[in-house]
Amino acid sequence: MKVAVYPGSFDPITLGHLDIIRRASVMFDKLIVVVMKNSAKTSLFSPDERVKMIEDCVGDLDNITVDSYDGLLIDYCKKEQIHIVLRGLRAITDFEYELQIAQTNRELSHNNVDTVFLTTNLIYSYLSSSSVKEIAGYDGDVSGMVTENVLERLREKYGHNSKGN
Ligand code: ADP
């Protein structure tokens, strides 16, 4: 069985992430989306909130599961016996960072973990969780960037009652 893990902060999950998940769901027998807790970034949503939001978004895809992990990705892969990591590439600026992480994970795992990349759907190439948070924080319109359930959670977090605009 071909199993891959899609790790990230997902703070929160965007339509760009979801597009990658949907496309990967037909390439792998099983895809585990993992909310990584050990990011250097300070997060808006707790890992449990992020897991719940992703679960709500992928409920219609039965080969996707969602998990969270506090530790090194290669240790998660070892624990779950997974050899494929999936990452998304938006632009050339993502490439250097992603290449370094992919090489590091391959090295640390003694060549047991490889990373595959999916290039973003161009309509989401500008999209990042950080910009969603920044725009939503100023009560801007992020309705074309996230799903309705995430929009609702953002409204709760920021205490805005409007539709995000
Ligand atoms: P991290 O904080 O680990 O970079 P993110 O949650 O920001 O995690 O992103 C997880 C993965 O999804 C990364 O591989 C990232 O490049 C990819 N990604 C983020 N936004 C998009 C997007 N708009 N389109 C495609 N891939 C994306």
Image: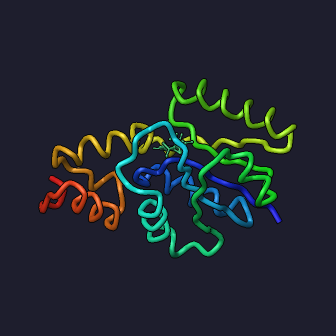
Give the mark count: 0
- The vertical placement of 100 against 13, above or below, is above
Residue drawn at x 64%, y 62% is 25
Image position, residue 17 (x, y; %):
49, 51
- The vertical placement of 87 against 52, above or below, is above
Q: Quadrant of the N terminus?
A: bottom right
Image position, residue 23 (x, y; %):
60, 57
Determine the image quadrant of residue 164: bottom left
82 to the left or right of 92: right
Determine the image quadrant of residue 131: top left
Image position, residue 70 (x, y; %):
59, 51
In this view of the protein, which residue sits in the foreground, 100 or 30?
100
34 to the left or right of 143: right
In this view of the protein, which residue sits in the foreground, 78 or 17?
78
Residue drawn at x 60%, y 24% is 96
Determine the image quadrant of residue 162: bottom left
In this view of the protein, which residue sits in the foreground, 40 or 57?
40
Image position, residue 155 (x, y; %):
22, 60
Residue drawn at x 66%, y 41% is 117
Residue drawn at x 21%, y 46% is 137
Q: How is colour applied across the structure in the image?
A: rainbow
117 to the left or right of 82: left
65 to the left or right of 47: right
- The vertical placement of 83 against 122, above or below, is below
